[in-house]
Image: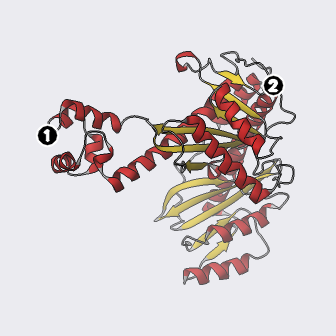
Amino acid sequence: MPSWWPAVCRDRLAALSHVQSRQGINPQGIEEADVFAAHQEGGQTCVEVFFFRTGQNWGNHAFFPKAGGTEAGEVLSSFIAQFYDDKPCPSLVLVSHTFEDMALMTEALSEKAGRRVEVLRPQRGEKKDVVEQAVQNAREALARRMADTSSQLKLLEGVGRVFGLAEVPKRIEVYDNAHIMGSNPVGGMIVAGPGGFVKNQYRKFNIRSTDITPGDDFGMMREVMERRFSRLVKEHGSRAEAPRDEDGFGPWPDLVLIDGGAGQLSAVKSIIDELGITDVPLVGVAKGPDRDAGRERFFVPGRPDFMLPTRDPILYFIQRLRDEAHRFANGSHAVRRSKQISEGGLQEIPGVGPTRKRALLNHFGTLKEIERAALTDLEKVAGISATTAKAIHDFFRKG
């Protein structure tokens, strides 16, 4: 076990001890208001927002805007202006810090709402207590995020060390494919960085090529890689030229993980080489015997394949990445499959033609009910044999 792992566990336990409170914050004097509180530490900012409606606390949410060296008041000013760009504004907005254009903000929000909106930093009483509680929540939320980020960075450092990378990877892309007997093939890409999973960077690839044999995972991966990296080169140039943010996160991957062994890795490497890309590290992650988690084997070009100790935190981390890619690819496949069924009808299922389709819909009423039906219920439909019932049942549950 790495020497830093106990410290990571300690930090996470400490973060868990700071439970973000929502109950009990129902001041009598606040009927309708939003509360914005900012806390800054370690070059990061958290903005905590409390929502009060009809005299009750309707919850709170923490946001982490990219603020750089901007002071808390300026962050709040910019954040509030964007926050109400697409949502209604209450009659009262409470803030933890003053900023230069508070009067202008009041005027702008009032005009947008069509009634008077007051923006103020309270100095006493219940309103001040609520703002202070929001500041405390912001402080604790930022501490949890920094603890998570610290442990994430240590894990990324460990990944770089395990795979012999020249630098700590700040953007990891993981690829997986999903299909059922070759139908509705979909490729999925998930992204992880210093802050964890970056879900707005996830991508799905509906396989378009008609030359790929159904079930050909190599062919599917080839199409995914060609589309992904051709577009990357077109939009951002080379990896060395592409911009990065202050955390070192950019559009190009610092490491690509492929769900598969030596064959999948070789196929992907040939595609990358054909595109003239030589600076993207590739690793194949092959499932263990009987697909046992913890017995994965890793394939790195130019190195013998190897395994990690079953209790190694880096192994757990890579398993999480792979499982997330698997979840995303399967979810994307399910959406595509459901859409095709809705558009093309139940005839896609072997053994189900127009007559049996009508019988099923007459019996269950909707496609959703057919999808949910138990095997015994499907067997009760007139004209549906046990074999066809099982085909229908299996079709909606595979993958």
> What colour scheme has been applied to the protein in the rendered image?
secondary structure
Q: Position of residue 261 (x, y in %)?
A: 64, 26
- For the residue carrying disc 1, how many other residues have a C-alpha within 10 Å: few (<14), some (14-19), or many (20+)? few
Q: Amino acid at mark 1?
A: Gly
Which residue occupies 23% across, 35% down?
388
Secondary structure under tag 2 reads loop
Label 1 element class: loop
In the displayed orientation, state which residue is furthest to the front.
211
The kind of residue on which mark 2 rests is Gly
In this picture, is 198 found above or below 237?
Answer: above
Distance Cα–Cα, label 1 vs label 2: 59 Å
Of the 4 image quadrants, the one containing the C terminus is: top left
Instruction: Please tell me how crowded label 2 is: few (under 14), some (14-19), or many (20+) other residues with Cα within 10 Å.
Output: few
Identify the residue position indicated by label 1 in the image.
Answer: 383
Whether residue 222 is visible, yes or no, is yes
Q: How many marks?
A: 2
Left or right: where 368 falls relative to 44: left
